Amino acid sequence: MFRPVGAIIGNRRFGKSSTAVAAIQVKNVAQKVIKEKCADLPAEVLGQIKVKTFKNATLTMACPTLVAAELYMRSEELKKAMNGQFGRTIVKDLRFRTF
């Protein structure tokens, strides 16, 4: 009668909330990939990178201006690693908002 939560999350065909679940998964993978691929950056800089939104295959991150420039230079590598985690193309574009 009851289904485990893992079974519900794994099934992405359960209504409007499926896009919200996908966005949360993408955000988690993005944070993990940034920590792995940008390990050469200082910890205080990594702490300033915030994954904000995922909509229409575009992932938006907020970070300081110089960090945004560095991440922009690495954007293809980051997208490739993120999509590799999913096994298909989920993230098509990265956008950076500066503060």
Image (tube, rainbow, N blue to C red):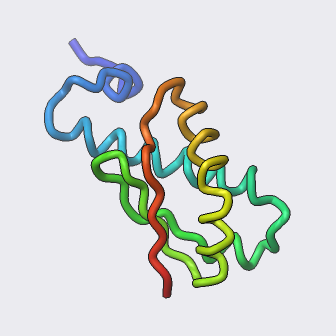
Q: Nearer the viewer, residue 54 or 21?
A: 54
The residue at 21%/12% (across/down) is 1
Q: Residue furthest right?
A: 40
Relative to residue 86, is residue 49 depicted above or below? Answer: below
Q: Would you identify the image quadrant in which residue 81 lies?
A: top right
Find residue 98 and report its horizontal and vertical position in percent: 49, 82
Q: Would you identify the image quadrant in which residue 5 lies?
A: top left
The residue at 36%/39% (across/down) is 22
The residue at 81%/74% (across/down) is 42
Is residue 60 rendered to the left or right of residue 34? left
Find residue 86 and report its horizontal and vertical position in percent: 52, 29
The residue at 48%/67% (across/down) is 61
Is residue 7 rendered to the left or right of residue 63? left
Is residue 41 rendered to the left or right of residue 12? right
Is residue 14 rendered to the left or right of residue 63? left
Find residue 48 and report its horizontal and vertical position in percent: 62, 77
Relative to residue 75, is residue 49 depicted above or below? Answer: below
